[in-house]
Image (cartoon, rainbow, N blue to C red):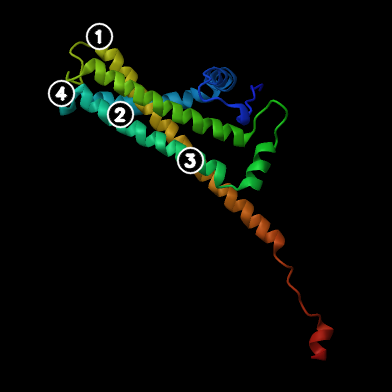
Amino acid sequence: MENESIDPRTVDLHDYNQLLRFFRGQVAPRLLNDCFHWKSLLASIAIALPLLLAIGFSPADSMPVQDAASLGMSFGAVSFGACLTVAILTIGLPGAERARRWANKDRKLGSSNAYTELLFNITWSALVQLGLIFLAVASAAIGGAAGLAPAELLSWHSAILLVCTFWFGYSLVELLHVLLALSQMGVVIVSEERRMAGRNRPAPTSQGPSEEQGE
């Protein structure tokens, strides 16, 4: 897969073309196969449906939209912080030598490997959490003190509620993906350390029958 390379020495935080290049070179090729994989979409729907039922058949239907939005903003902020923490651990935990080896393992020019895919997934999950925060802020601004449950089934209120609950489920799924990836990376590090320790362990010495008789 061809990806546009970015030299970290020349990155300008105010150059928004870098963001466009990221979406064009990194997100677009992975949009259906990774970002919005059908398994992730099904899991998101499975999380959103119980929430919708709870809103329609529980006292939560009278909760003000701004209160529900504040919960979404809190969850998104905590999840975004967790993604940043995992990103730091992913880069720093393996160590410079192992990270360099992983970055070049099974990688051809212009292609990616498991380590670069992991870094992308963490970045994408962080962007998803930012999307959740944006939706929460927009919902609070639009809904205000109105009840969470829509008065009419076919309305803008219902459409926004569907989008927000689905995106909440999707953000939760992406956060779980990141945590599982961190766990798997830890397993790989432990496995490599054990294998290296086994190679460096000195071979046991045994005395032959003639040496035992001489003693």
| Crowdedness near tag 2: few (<14), some (14–19) or many (≥20) residues, C-alpha within 10 Å | many
Report x, y in % for residue 133: 35, 26
Residue found 68% across the figure and 42% down from its top: 101
Let me know if residue 43 appears in the view: no
Report x, y in % for residue 173: 42, 31
Up-down relation of residue 93 to residue 201 (above or below): above
**Which tag is nearer the camera, tag 4 or tag 2?**
2
Up-down relation of residue 89 to residue 79 (above or below): below
Report x, y in % for residue 80: 41, 33
Q: Are marks 4 and 1 in contact (CB under 8 Å)?
A: no
Q: Which residue is mark 4?
A: 62
- Quadrant into which the N terminus falls: top right
Q: Nearer the viewer, residue 157 or 91?
A: 91
Q: Which residue is mark 3?
A: 86
Label 1 – label 3 distance at C-alpha: 39 Å
**Which tag is nearer the camera, tag 4 or tag 3?**
3
Q: Are marks 4 and 3 in contact (CB under 8 Å)?
A: no
Upstream in sequence: badge 3 or badge 2? 2
Upstream in sequence: badge 1 or badge 3? 3
Upstream in sequence: badge 4 or badge 3? 4
